[in-house]
Amino acid sequence: MEFPSPTKTWHNASYPAISPSNTALSVKGKTIFITGGGAGIGLAIAYAFAAAGTSTVAISGRTEKTLLSAKNGIESAHEGVTVLPFVADVTDQKAVDAAFASGGKVDILVHIAGYLPRLVPISQSRLQDWWSGFETNAKGSFIVTQAFLRVAASDATLLENDNRHGPLASFASLFGLPGFKDCRTQVI
Ligand SMILES: NC(=O)c1ccc[n+]([C@@H]2O[C@H](COP(=O)([O-])OP(=O)(O)OC[C@H]3O[C@@H](n4cnc5c(N)ncnc54)[C@H](OP(=O)(O)O)[C@@H]3O)[C@@H](O)[C@H]2O)c1
């Protein structure tokens, strides 16, 4: 079955208008902080910012080995880029605060670290697994946003993934985020 595309054209690779090598999109001189930047989508974003000219990318996650491997890979591929790895669970306020406080101003925050509980019916769902979604997605977003605001540059940008679209109870924690994001937009 063909995946239904919401747009006329489907891209599987970047094209000139959104390419990191497009000089109009340069982030030269900007400091980037990516939660969940050691693997998956966050790591791909870290590579893209390195290609777009940043000299400093901070990445955070819970696993030091993953972060160090990402650091080696990005710095080998992009001369002049320094990757700062921070071991910090987004649900651990002390660790997140310390990570953000250890550098200078942050121009762009990409908050990707998230958790999708197992996609099973409620009858088979484990409370702790289901609650981990709330801890990581809702509490984590609050902690990361608060730490970021203390060091955000005056024209800073915050980018987040938005994976709340789904029919299952496992997605419940993600539905709390739009409310938090709306409040944040109005208050900041
Ligand atoms: N892949 C997709 O197709 C897709 C689509 C839509 C949305 N999403 C969402 O996008 C996010 C990233 O997806 P992904 O596929 O890149 O996942 P992934 O490969 O599992 O990467 C997640 C990253 O976040 C970090 N992380 C997870 N929990 C964390 C926590 N509590 N504190 C700090 N860091 C944490 C992980 O590092 P450690 O494990 O070392 O902490 C890892 O670096 C997830 O929330 C996912 O639900 C994914």
Image: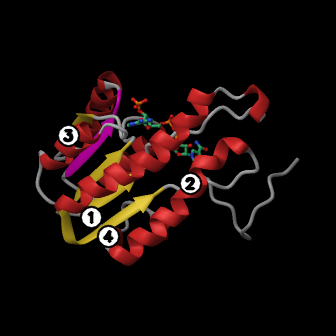
Mark 2 belongs to which amino acid?
Ala
- For the residues labelled 4 and 2, the Cα–Cα distance comes to 18 Å
Ligand 1 within 8 Å, label 1 CB:
no
Q: Is residue 158 visible?
A: yes
The residue under the point 31% across, 31% down is 67
Q: Which residues are magenta?
A: 56-62
Crowd tier of the residue under label 2, counting other residues whose Cα lies within 10 Å: few below 14, some 14–19, many 20 or above: few
| Picture disc at residue 27 | 1
Residue 106 in view in this figure: no
Residue 153 or residue 70, whichever sits in front: 153
Tell me the residue at 58%/51% (across/down).
174
Amino acid marked by disc 1: Val
x, y percent for residue 16: 48, 67
Residue 60 among those drawn in magenta: yes
At a point 71% along the width and 44% down the height, the residue shown is 169
Q: Secondary structure at mark 4?
A: helix
Task: Give the amino acid at mark 3.
Answer: Leu
Mark 4 burial class by Cα count in 10 Å: few <14, some 14-19, many 20+:
few
Residue annotated with mark 3: 84
Q: Name the residue tied to disc 2.
A: 13
Q: Mark 2 and mark 3: span between their CA atoms?
A: 27 Å
